[in-house]
Amino acid sequence: MFKPLIAIVGHSGSGKSSSLRNLDPKTTYILDLERKGFPFVDANKFNIIPVENANAFTRELNKVLKEDNCKTIVVESFTKYVEQVHTLANTSFKGYDIWSFYNRTIRATLDAVKNDKATVIFTAVDDIVKIPQVTGGETSHRRIKVQGKVHEGAIEKEFLMVLFTETRKNEKTEKMEYFFQTNTDGVTSAKTPMGMFDEQLIPNDIVTVLDSIDKYYK
C-alpha cells in the first residue's frame, strides 16, 4: 500500500512551512526548491537537500527514497517545482511541445512520489479563481496554483489529503493563530478521509495529522 500524499496549501505567511516544525529531523528529508530557509528553531537539524532545477528534483527524490531512515519527504514547494518545469519546457521546446513536455513531466513526478516507504508532503501556494454559474453570477474557488489547463483544478485528486491553511486573530491575546482546514467549506478543495477529523479547523501541526493517519488506518 502506498504511503499517503499530503498537500499543504496557502498563501505566504499562512503557516505552511512552520507546520513542519515538529517532524522528526532524523527521519525527515526536505527537498528544498525554495531555498529560503525555514521559520522554526532547529531547522538546521533536518536533512535539507537544495534542489536547483526540475532535472535535479527527480535525481534527488530517487536518492532520498533509498535512505534507510527516510520516513517523511517534504517537497518545499510544489509551486516552485511547477515553475522549474515550465522554465525547462520553455528553454527546451517550442509551440505545442512546450505544454506536451510540461504535462508529461508533472504526470511522471506525481507518479514517482507514490511509494510504499515514505509519506510525501507537498507545500503549495493557493490560487483563487472565479467560476461562472449556470444560474448566473460566479463563485470563488480556492485551489492549488498550477500552470496548464490540463492540471488546473485537477491536482488535488492526486492527494489523499489536501490541507488549506487558515489564520485567525485571537481576540483575547490579539495574536494570530494558525490552522489547517480539513474539509471544504464550499470555497476550498480541502479534503481528508471520511471521519478522520471531527473539526473543520485543527492546529497547523503536520505531526498531529500524521498521527491521525496512523490511528485511522491501524
Image: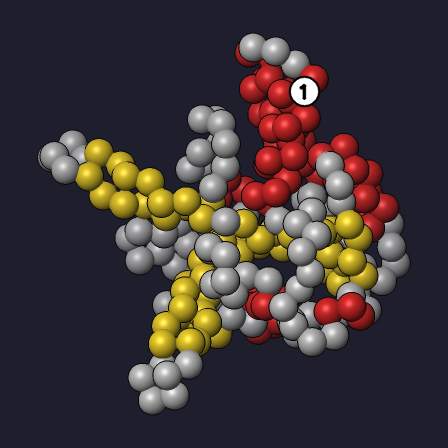
Q: Give x and y (percent) for residue 216.
A: 55, 67
Position of residue 64 in the picture relative to residue 126 (left or right): right
Is residue 78 visible from the viewing direction of this image? Answer: yes
The foreground one among 116 and 185 is 185
- In the current view of this chain or complex, which residue is farthest to the front? 36
Residue at the (47%, 55%) spot, across then down: 10
The foreground one among 150 and 81 is 81
Q: Give x and y (percent) for residue 203.
A: 48, 74
Height in image: 191 above or below 86? below
Q: Give x and y (percent) for residue 150.
A: 48, 26
Tell me which corner region of the image, top left, top right, bottom left or bottom right, holds residue 158.
top right
The residue labelled by disc 1 is: 91
Figure quadrant of the C terminus: bottom right
Height in image: 113 above or below 97? below
Residue at the (60%, 17%) spot, across then down: 98
Q: Give x and y (percent) for residue 86.
A: 60, 28
